[in-house]
Amino acid sequence: MHPRPVILRRLPQPARSSLAIAATLSLMAAATPAAASDTAAHGAVHAKTASAATAAPETAPAAEATDPIEKLRLRLAERLAGKKSVASASGDLHLVARTAPSAAPASESPTAARPAGRSAVAMNSSKLSRPTEPAAHEAHPVGAPAHWSYGGAAGPQSWATLKPEFSLCGNGQRQSPIDIRGGLAVDLDPVRFDYQQSPFTVVDNGHTVQVNVAPGNSIDVGGKRFDLVQFHFHRPSEERIDGRQFEMSLHLVHKDDQGRLAVVGVLFDKGQAQPQVQKVWNALPLERNTESTSRTPLELLGLLPEDRRYITYMGSLTTPPCSEDVRWIVMRQPVTLTAQQIDIFARIYPMNARPVQSVAGRRIIQSQ
């Protein structure tokens, strides 16, 4: 009996390439498993191409497994399929790691989902590599009020240059305060003070100690009513009379129904205690820009001197924006404070008075 001749089948070109790759992978895996694994990862792209080609030839049925060449082909195909699946998995991870973006896209936000395949280490490295942005508070916000003060570069000599709205502080024609001299003595109508016992709050606004009072207090000047809005303190006095500057001054700010302002100025000399001012000191807040409510109401009439004669002229606000057309009413008789009461304010604001401004030919009138 003659042995059955062995027929060698010529495999298609893609299959031969696949077999060659598989054989190479097998030999390298036997020699150096670690090297084979790495080679398999890099060869995943070629293996995928080969798998498409080897999928075309049908695997031989079980009856043909006795053919030695067929056995070899099937065994290599199975090994190739196993290597291909491993290489494909490792290759995907390898490719993702190599193509991971180095910086977050513009649309990325801290709450966005983490990209698939990107490790926590890669995310942290990306964040660390970004340039640090300046904190929001380090930049000057657009539209924020310009800083001004009573000394240094932002002092009164520079107010007009800090903001366009402050221009009157430099080029205004009727600015306050002034040194009041040579007033025309006439028979002026008295200022009628309609002041009530009032609840109040105190705030340190960064420039002075300000007192906000409840509505219902007003003055009548020449038949015009002005409602009291707030009052505040300056040290030393901003106004001067015949060249004399006083220890402190108090400005009671009033407004009429058309928005025009009238300010009553009270001058302070050193002497006896002033009970109503002491109520303000007793309600001082612990921090700036926080409002403190007094437990006891204020007797506003107690802030005024007994002699209600006054000096009046047209001027401006003594702080930026230095708005003009403000009617000033300065009490001629000072009120007294003790040295301790003066020192309480001086320890908060040693100096918060604007220098005197040019009278510029304005008319000054005083009541007899």
Image (spheres, rainbow, N blue to C red):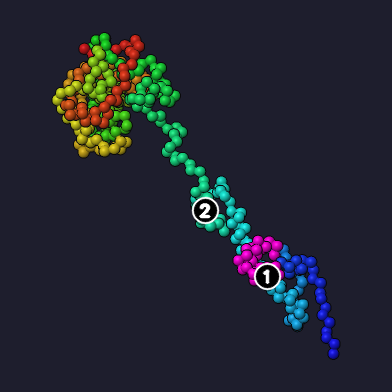
Residue furthest right in the image: 2
Report the side of 352 relative to 8 (left or right).
left
The segment highlighted magenta reads 22-47
Q: Find residue 118 and report its image quarter.
A: bottom right
Q: How far is the residue under mark 2 from the one under mark 1?
A: 39 Å
| Crowding at mark 2 (Cα within 10 Å: few <14, some 14-19, many 20+) | some
Percent x, y of residue 80: 69, 70
Q: Find residue 261 and report its image quarter.
A: top left
Residue occupying the point 71% across, 75% down: 75
Residue furthest left in the image: 272
Q: Nearer the viewer, residue 197 or 46?
A: 46
User: Split into 4 quadrants, where in the image is the C terminus?
Assistant: top left
User: Split into 4 quadrants, where in the image is the N terminus?
Assistant: bottom right
Amino acid at dot 1: Leu
| Crowding at mark 1 (Cα within 10 Å: few <14, some 14-19, many 20+) | few
Residue furthest front in the image: 31
Report the side of 5 relative to 143 (left or right).
right
Badge 1 element: helix
Badge 2 element: helix
Percent x, y of residue 89: 62, 65
Q: Nearer the viewer, residue 340 or 164?
A: 340
Residue 123's tag is 2
Residue occupying the point 83% across, 84% down: 4
Q: Find residue 296 and report its image quarter.
A: top left
Amino acid at dot 2: Met
Residue 75: tell me if it is visible: yes
- The residue identified by callout 1 is 27
Cβ atoms at labels 2 and 1 below 8 Å apart: no
Residue occupying the point 40% across, 19% down: 170
